[in-house]
C-alpha cells in the first residue's frame, strides 16, 4: 500500500487531487482560490470545501475559526485503513455537526489550550455511524448532494 509509506504532505496532495477529480467527474464545479476550495452544486448552491485525510484511526478536524466566515462548508474525508489500496470516502456538511452527535465532535477547549474545532471520532465503534455520509450515499453524479 503506497499510502503507508507516503509522507503527510504526499498523502495530503494525493487526497486533494483525488477529491477535486471526484467532484468534477460527479458534475460539480470546483475552483481553487489560494488554499481555499470552492464548490458549486449544479443548482447553484455554493460550499467552502475542506479536505482531510486519515490513516487508520486518527482524529480529523477543522478549526472552527476556518469555518466561521463560511455560510456553508463541507469536510471531505479520505480514510485509509488496514490493507485497502483506496480510502473510504466520506462527505460531511456543516449541518451534520448541529448538536454534535457522536461520532461528530464539537470541541471548545477551555483556557486556550487548543483552538475550538469540529472533529470526527474514527474509532471502530463509531465507524457504522458514519456510513450515511459515505461518498456513494451522498454523491450521485448529477452535481447535487443527498444528505441523510
Image (cartoon, rainbow, N blue to C red):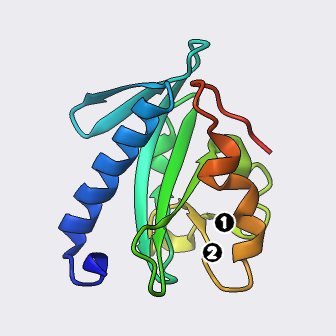
Q: Residues within 10 Å of mark 2 (few under 14, many from 20)?
A: some
Q: Is residue 115 left or right of residue 133?
A: left
Circle 2: element type: loop
Q: Nearer the viewer, residue 94 or 68?
A: 94
Q: Nearer the viewer, mark 2 or mark 1?
A: 2
Badge 1 is on which residue? 105
Give percent across and percent down for residue 21.
35, 40
What residue do we see at 75% from left, 55% from top? 132
x 63%, y 75%: residue: 121
SS state under label 1: strand
Q: Which mark is residue 142?
A: none
Q: Position of residue 41 (x, y in %)?
A: 56, 22
Q: Quadrant of residue 108?
A: bottom right
**Does label 2 or label 1 sit earlier along the sequence?**
1
| Quadrant in the picture for residue 145 | top right
Distance of mark 2 from mark 1, alpha carbons?
7 Å
Quarter of the C terminus within the rendering: top right
- Identify the residue shown where x is 60% and y is 77%: 122
Question: Do labels 2 and 1 touch, CB within 8 Å?
Answer: yes
What residue is disc 2 on?
Answer: 121
> Crowdedness of circle 1 by 10 Å Cα count: few (<14), some, many (20+)?
some
Placement of 146 over or under 89, stated as above or below: above
With respect to residue 59, does 29 lie above or below? above
The location of residue 134, given as percent across then percent down, is 65, 56
Horizontal placement of 44 versus 113: left or right?
A: right
Residue 104: x and y in percent read 68, 64
The residue closer to the viewer here, 94 or 112, is: 94
Q: In the rendered image, which quarter contains the N terminus?
A: bottom left
Q: Residue at x 45, y 36 (%)?
A: 23
- Residue farthest top in this picture: 44
Amino acid at each position: 500500500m503506497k499510502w503507508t509509506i507516503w509522507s503527510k504532505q504526499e498523502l495530503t496532495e494525493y487526497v486533494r487531487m483525488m477529491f477535486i477529480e471526484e467532484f468534477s467527474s460527479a458534475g460539480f464545479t470546483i475552483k481553487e482560490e489560494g488554499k481555499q476550495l470552492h464548490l458549486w452544486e449544479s443548482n447553484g448552491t455554493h460550499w467552502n470545501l475542506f479536505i482531510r485525510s486519515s490513516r487508520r484511526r486518527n482524529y480529523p478536524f477543522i478549526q472552527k475559526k476556518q469555518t466561521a466566515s463560511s455560510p456553508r462548508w463541507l469536510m471531505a474525508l479520505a480514510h485509509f485503513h488496514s490493507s485497502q489500496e483506496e480510502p473510504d470516502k466520506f462527505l460531511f456538511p456543516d449541518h451534520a455537526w448541529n448538536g454534535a452527535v457522536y461520532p461528530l465532535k464539537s470541541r471548545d477547549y477551555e483556557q486556550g489550550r487548543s483552538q475550538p474545532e469540529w472533529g470526527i471520532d474514527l474509532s471502530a465503534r463509531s465507524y457504522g455511524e458514519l456510513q450515511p455520509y459515505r461518498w456513494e450515499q451522498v454523491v450521485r453524479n448529477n452535481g447535487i448532494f443527498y444528505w441523510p
